[in-house]
Image (cartoon, rainbow, N blue to C red):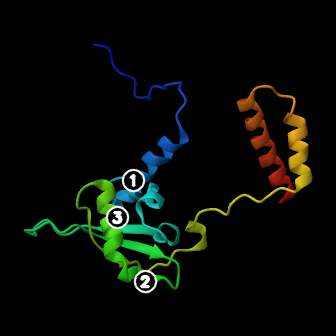
Amino acid sequence: MARKSSTPKRSNRTVQLGDMIGNALDPALKKRGFASRDLIAHWHTIAPPPWDKISLPDKLVWPRRDRPDPEGAVLHLRCLEGHGLALSHEGQAIAAAVNRYFGYLIVGSVRLSAMPLTAGMQQPDPPRTLPRAAIDSIRAQTGGIEDEGLREALAKLGRGVLGKRSN
């Protein structure tokens, strides 16, 4: 029998960054009670407005296994300061939205987390608008390109480059 080498075999293939980061995040998310990252990754789709923009899931606390009736987990949410009282009143609607998204009872109640939602956790600011002269310059440079998809891609690239320079 041939012995296997102890060094791991290199696969020589590209791996998407999202897959690598996702696998690295799974143990940390499991410590917070999340079986998968779907609840956090799709929160802006799951949560009803305005909670999709001003709150984020912090952790899930599952009930003990010796309970006779399944009651669902307690979802702890972080929210912007000043919205905690409204969040406590809308907890059942948020729990219903989460359960509706997953198709089964996952959240029994919603509570406010002790940690507030900080500015770094929110979505990034929308891109800044370019001056009219910069937009006209991009149109003039990409106007001679016949392929519409390529022209739009280059225009988007130009807006991104000029937007970063003007900031």
**Secondary element at tag 1:** helix
Q: Which residue is mark 1?
A: 38
Question: Taking the image as drawn, is residue 62 in sight?
Answer: yes
N-terminal of the pair, mark 3 or mark 2, is 2
Name the spot of residue 166 as percent of width and height, x first. Answer: 86, 57
Residue at left offset 24%, top offset 67%: 62
Vertical position of residue 116 compared to residue 166: above or below: below
* Label 2, label 1: how far apart the Cα atoms are: 25 Å
Q: Is residue 23 left or right of residue 163?
A: left
* Label 1, label 3: how far apart the Cα atoms are: 14 Å
N-terminal of the pair, mark 2 or mark 1, is 1
- Split into 4 quadrants, where in the image is the N terminus? top left
**Secondary element at tag 2:** helix
Residue at left offset 33%, top offset 56%: 101
Q: Which residue is mark 2?
A: 86
Name the spot of residue 78 as percent of width and height, x first. Answer: 45, 74
Marks 3 and 2 close (CB-CB < 8 Å):
no
Residue at left offset 35%, top offset 62%: 31
Marks 2 and 1 close (CB-CB < 8 Å):
no
Which amino acid type is shown beneath numbered disc 3? Ala
Name the spot of residue 39 as percent of width and height, x first. Answer: 39, 58
Residue 137: quarter of image: top right
Vertical position of residue 12 compared to residue 74: above or below: above
Residue at left offset 42%, top offset 86%: 85
**Secondary element at tag 3:** helix
Say the numbered circle drawn on residue 97.
Answer: 3
Vertical position of residue 33 compared to residue 13: above or below: below
- Split into 4 quadrants, where in the image is the C terminus? bottom right
Q: Nearer the viewer, residue 30 or 36?
A: 36
